[in-house]
Image: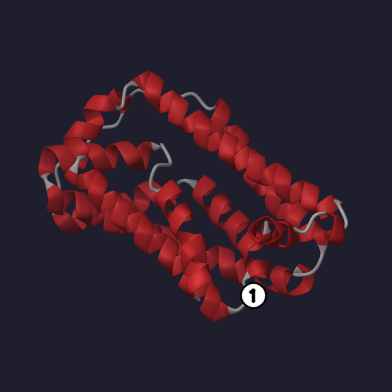
Amino acid sequence: MIDDIQAAIPLGFLLSFMIGPVFFVLLETSATKGFRAGVSLDIGVILADIVFLLIAYFSSFQLLENLSNEPGLFVFGGMILLVYGIFLFVKKAKKKSNVKATKGTYLGLLVKGFLLNFINIGVLAFWLGMIIVVGPSLQNNPDRMLVFFGTVLLVYFGTDLMKILLAKQLKRYLTQERIVLIKKGLGIVLIICGIVLITKGFLPKDKFDIQERIEKIEDL
């Protein structure tokens, strides 16, 4: 379980800096309305992620059961990450002025955060790809998957709390050029991960066993 938690922490941190409409609305809301408003919005975002995770898990459960030991699973999951990474890399960043926070109660902000995240079908595709890729390494064990993805969301939320506290400073430093660089960097990371998984799917297991190579490096 400890290994699952340690593996989930970097992913949760990375997700918190996925540049998109939710990212800027969260900063705008936090800077103009305060900490509680930002937290309310972010809770809505997290709830949408939980719904997407449940949809992705139950829609892919049978696939995981049937293909957990098949190379096609890595190819399929890798393709999802590859396409999503290319999308992030080539998509042009929208101007921050296009996204404005509107007045509303805390409940209204929670609903707004939920809807902003829920209407982005790319989020569902991302979670589906992650479950397909991570599932076999967790032996498709529901308890281990709960710990892993629960940790991801907790780290995600914790990092968002830091963003909310530093919203005004972050807005000042997030120029259009830096936003483009961050998006392209995240896209490259996902593209590399996708290519690695696709390659692993096509090569024999004994020729491309990541875990075995890591153990060999640790023995050096």
Secondary structure beneath dot 1 equals loop
Q: Quadrant of the C terminus?
A: bottom right
Binning the other alpha carbons within 10 Å of mark 1 as few (below 14), some (14 to 19) or many (20 upward) gives: some
Q: Residue at x 88, y 57 (%)?
A: 204
* Res 94 visible: no
Q: Residue at x 64, y 45 (%)?
A: 193
Horizontal and vertical percent for residue 120?
47, 46
Above-or-below relation of 138 to 203: below
* Residue in the foreground of this view, choosing between 34 and 8: 8
Horizontal and vertical percent for residue 76?
74, 53
At label 1, the amino acid type is Asn
Horizontal and vertical percent for residue 78?
70, 49
Q: Can you name the residue that lies furthest to the front here? A: 220
* Side (left or right) of 122 relative to 208: left
Q: Can you name the residue that lies furthest to the right here? A: 204
**Residue at the disc numbered 1:** 140
Above-or-below relation of 96 to 118: above
* Residue in the foreground of this view, choosing between 22 and 149: 149
Residue 99 lies in quadrant: top left
Q: Residue at x 79, y 69 (%)?
A: 69
* Residue in the foreground of this view, choosing between 149 and 54: 149
Q: Can you name the residue that lies furthest to the top here? A: 177
Horizontal and vertical percent for residue 207?
85, 55
* Side (left or right) of 1 relative to 217: left
